[in-house]
Amino acid sequence: MTQPSPTVKVRFDQVTYSYGAAPALQNITLDVYANTITVFFGPAGSGKTTALRLINRLNDLAEGARLSGRLLLDGQDIYARNADVSALRRRVGMVFALPLPLPGTIRENVTYGPRLAGLRDHARLAELTERSLIQAALWNEVKDRLDDPATALSGGQQQRLCIARSLALEPEVLLLDEPTSGLDPISTARVEESLFQLKSHYTIIIVPHSIQQAARVADWAAFFLKGEMIECQEGTALFTTPHDQRTEDYITGRFG
Amino acid sequence: MEFAKAPGLTKRWGEFAIETIIRVLGLSSIGFVVMIFLFLLREGLPTFWEIPLNNLLGTRWYPTFDYFGAVPLVLGSVLVTLLAIVIALPLGLATAVFVREIAPPWAREILKPVIEVLAGIPSVVLGFFGMTLVAPLVREVLGAPTGLTAFTGALLLAYMALPTMISVAEDALDTVPKSYRDAGLSMGATQWQTIWRVVVPAARSGVVTAVMLGMGRAIGETMAVMMVTGNAARLPLSLDSLFRPVRTMTATIAAEMGEVAQGSTHYHALFGLGIILFALTFVINLAAAATIFKKRRRGGLR
């Protein structure tokens, strides 16, 4: 079991979110603890990705989206009227399903966020580059060719580069949306490996691309179905003795 | 059995006929280009041995007195075109970004067709508009002796190049996947930073194409330019020549071709100008292709 009183990093407080007619998320209440890996899983269209994207306000772009309830980061309302969205997104990094190197070199990719934020100091940028790439388990493979185009890397390397790019901003929370869906098993293992190392510094929320992966990485797991959160408990417990029949049906493969 | 065979046979013949027609049509368009090029060379190349080189490179174009100095005309075309692009690029890019990235959907629905209609305005109409409205404005605002200047021509050309530039640039922005925007935003970039530092650089090759197409439209444009640039074949070397009359190659050809004796030196000289124009356009396109290729290999992001 985990520490006696874990810190709540992200809290969903009766969050209902909709764009168009039907709510995409319904009355979600959920705590994500600091320095853990929390898994949001469920079938397609269950709202897990939506929930993830709400945390760094990427869904602000959607037309006619409505949100009720509160979403808290360190007890502060993310959607408060005076909240600084850019600052939030620097605290909450995101890695997407498809590796998406920006046009440019490996180094330019990693230092992209810090440079956007106004960091110009070369020594500091170099240090960030090295540390982020080490944390993402990519440093040894690219340290001699930081000025090569990022697109020259393999898919797995590109995805770890994207993780490094998020880490370079020194976020507190790292969101990963099916980060290994396009990767082979070996690259997947590398990415998962780096996640285990990262959780001592970061709070990680991941939408896994399979139930197996969910079970492998989860400290905590939340099961989503049709926009509702069915249950949330510690990973080992949820995957061995789920409380809810629907969770059990899903993880034993009765539907999916 | 015969019945079963027949359709297959017909289909093969039909297929063959269609393929042949498509192939002939495709090749003929190449053939036309080659033929036009050969014609241009046949009519224009004699210039280069009929007229001594120092006359051709001279600064005076008075065909009646056998002065065929093409330099003022070439520089006139280049000046007006470059100036037009300098004016059109920021406007066109900003408009494309606005239409694609910032405008709400309903505004986009209105803007796109309106921009396309702009492209359809005949250049004579624009030239008339330029003569009666823009030229007097330029004269009064800048205090120039005449409103028929290189700058006036560039303004009109910029306007004419804009619709093409906007459409092509906007298409280029459209091909940038949404995930690039998400990636930019999720690194804490503002919408503005995401547009200028992620989306536009990612669409860079399309933007270069847009500029080149605009340039191609501008350098080949004749009517509007002829109506508003004053058509004085002087050497545009000093800075204030922006606000003096110039004459372009296209305007020269259009103005003089009608009254020239076929086969004369003057006639050949006009085709010679055509060759120079063709070569310039070719170099522009080549340069564009080269930059796109080089940048793509380097993959650099500014």
Image (spheres, rainbow, N blue to C red):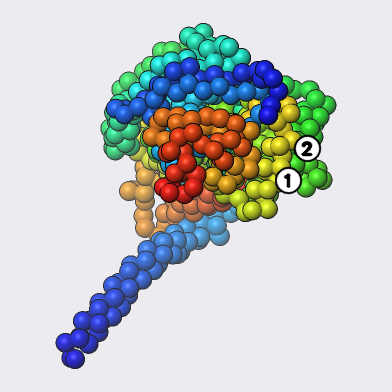
Q: Quadrant of the N terminus of chain A?
A: top right
* Residue carrying label 2: A134
- A152 or B235: which is nearer to us? A152
Instruction: Give, as a three-letter code, the residue at label 2.
Output: Ile
- Residue at image position (58%, 54%) is B52
Q: Residues within 10 Å of mark 2 (few under 14, many from 20)?
A: some
Q: Which residue is mark 1?
A: A148
Secondary structure found at label 1: loop
- Residue B187 location (% of width, % of height): 61, 27
User: Identity of the amino acid at label 1?
Assistant: Asp
Q: Residue A209 location, x and y as percent?
A: 54, 44
Rendered residue at 63%/33% (across/down)? A219
Tag 1 subunit: A
Q: Crowding at label 1, few (<14), some or many (≥20) Cα neighbours within 10 Å?
A: some
Classify residue B164 as left or right of residue B114: right
Q: Is residue B250 above or below residue B19?
A: above
Q: CA distance from mark 2 to mark 1?
A: 18 Å
Query: Do badges 2 and 1 share one subunit?
Result: yes
Secondary structure category for the residue under label 2:
helix
Judging depth in this view, the residue of B18 and B43 nearest the camera is: B18
Q: Position of residue A178 (x, y in %)?
A: 55, 41
Q: Closest to the observer: B10 or B60?
A: B10
Give the residue displayed 32% in from the left and 48% down from the top: B258
Across and down, in percent, residue B149 comes to 45, 26
Label count reads 2
For mark 2, name the chain.
A
Q: Residue at x 48, y 9 (%)?
A: A81
As rendered, which of A144 and A32 lies closer to the eye?
A: A32
